[in-house]
Amino acid sequence: MAMTLRLTDAEQDALRERAAAEGITMQEAARRAVREFVARGHHMDRVHNVASLIIDRHADALRRLGE
């Protein structure tokens, strides 16, 4: 699927410089950034879900530790 990405001049310059330093196109740099953003979000969701599970399962012990 195609999309248009609108960047400020500063963002575009930074992207161009970073992509050149990596030896990749600006498009590939942007695609990598999107993949990393999505992966980081999924990771944070998993961490939150597991933390909630642990808090629920060990609520009594956590309460006693806080006393």
Image (cartoon, helix red, strand yellow):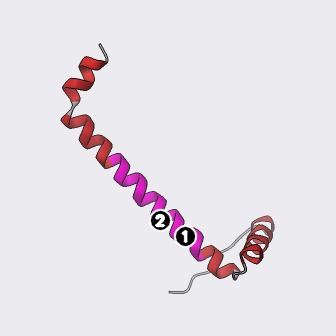
Query: Where residue 41 sits: x, y (%)?
Result: 45, 58
Mark 1 neighbour class, 10 Å CA radius: few under 14, some 14 to 19, many 20 or more: few
Quarter of the rendering containing residue 42: bottom left
The outermost residue toward the top is 67
Left or right: 24 as drawn, with respect to 2: right
Is-magenta flag for residue 51? no
Mark 1–mark 2 Cα distance, whole angstroms, equals 6 Å
Q: Which residue is mark 2?
A: 38
Q: Residue at x 35, y 54 (%)?
A: 46
Q: Residue at x 70, y 79 (%)?
A: 26
Vertical arrangement, residue 21 with respect to residue 43, above or below: below
Residue 61 located left or right of residue 20: left
Contact flag, marks 1 and 2 (Cβ < 8 Å): yes
Q: Residue furthest bottom?
A: 1
In the drawing, what numbered circle is on residue 11? none
The segment highlighted magenta reads 31-48
Q: Position of residue 59 (x, y in %)?
A: 22, 29
Kindly identify the amino acid type of the residue bearing the numbered disc 2: Val
Is 42 inside the magenta-drawn segment? yes
Q: Picture quarter containing residue 20?
A: bottom right
The amino acid on which the numbered mark 1 sits, given as a three-letter code, is: Val
Instruction: Name the residue tied to disc 1.
Output: 34
Helix, strand or loop for disc 2: helix
Q: Nearer the viewer, residue 13 or 66?
A: 66
Position of residue 10 in the picture relative to residue 47 (left or right): right
